Image (cartoon, grey):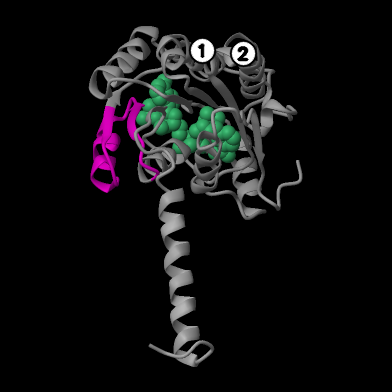
Amino acid sequence: MGAAGSPLETHRTSLEGIIVKSMESVEAHRALEGKVVLVTGASSGIGREVALTLSAAGARVAMGARRVDRLAALVESAHGELLPLQLDVTDSTSVQRAVSETVSRFGRLDALVNNAGLMQSGLILDADVREWQRMIDTNLLGSMYAVHAALPHLLDAKGAVVQVSSTAARSASLGSGVYAATKFGISAFSESLRQEVTRRGVRVIVIQPGFVDTELTSHITDPTMQAAAADIAASMRTLRPEDIAEAIVYALSQPEHVSVNEILVRPTDQVQ
Ligand code: NDP
């Protein structure tokens, strides 16, 4: 054994420090051990990363989307138990089924991450209103159906609802009217939900990401809007899906008396 203050002793002490720190970090990353979470829209982008990060944090995760083949591929890369579910959030029966399958597989539901979403930007004049219908059905009604189906279980578990909203819920911009309307709608619904359930122990968390590098803009059919989205992406260091996943794990890992109701995460380079 080295004498106190000797180079050997100093080395041993710093090694112990590193081991303690890495143990603490492992514990921090298992902060959701035993929790059951349902993530909608987990086949790509933010939802995919949220499912994997929650799983690494110890949660058992049910993941829903229409492209169920992609979800099946995710099961291989996860740390823990993942349940892939065929889900179309625009169909309330499909949503109800996904919640039931989650609870029958895992026995409970502690959190719903309402992430499935679609953006089809465009001007109002000459718009194809079927795109409006799809955005409202997916982003707004779909997330409401999921809350409706999950709520009895979340009340039992004193759980949480995470609403993946957007900076578009704070201010609309040219060409984003309907998408922004769906995200403003999510804010209204979430605040009403919060007032209804917070004293019964259910926490409502609204996440507002700025520009994240995902497939979201690939669904824009208007070539001018598609080019504008590409220009915005090229003009900044965009967020990565992991940045949003970490924020969600942070919010879900708080002690029961702490309700993180809103998180706004923009790329540092994003001005508006
Ligand atoms: P992606 O396009 O990569 O992911 C969207 C996800 O939603 C996919 O998994 C898709 O799965 C799913 N989805 C779409 N329609 C349905 C449906 N009817 N039923 C079930 N799942 C559906 O984009 P993001 O990851 O970027 O988007 C995720 C969320 O983040 C959205 O709510 C979006 O509005 C929000 N957001 C994104 C930002 C960004 O810059 N990327 C910024 C702010 C918010 P599938 O097609 O397999 O069904």
Q: Residue at x 69, y 18 (%)?
A: 125
Q: Which mark is residue 134?
A: none
Q: Which mark is residue 189?
A: 2
The quarter of the image holding the C terminus is: top right
Classify 150 as above or below 224: above
Q: Is residue 67 located in the magenta-colored stretch of the structure?
A: yes
Instruction: Tell me the kind of residue under disc 1.
Output: Met
Q: Residue at x 46, y 9 (%)?
A: 148
Please provide percent x and percent y for residue 185: 64, 16
The quarter of the image holding the N terminus is: bottom left
Please provide percent x and percent y for residue 242: 49, 47
Instruction: Tell me the kind of residue under disc 2.
Output: Phe
Q: Is residue 91 located in the magenta-colored stretch of the structure?
A: no
- Quarter occupied by residue 72: top left
Q: Residues within 10 Å of mark 1 (few under 14, many from 20)?
A: many
Report the front residue among 119 and 5: 5
- Quarter occupied by residue 258: top right
Q: Give the residues in magenta.
A: 57-84
| Residue to which mark 1 is pinned | 144
Q: Residue at x 30, y 12 (%)?
A: 97
Classify 270 as above or below 202: below
Q: Which label's residue is closer to the chain start, 1 or 2?
A: 1
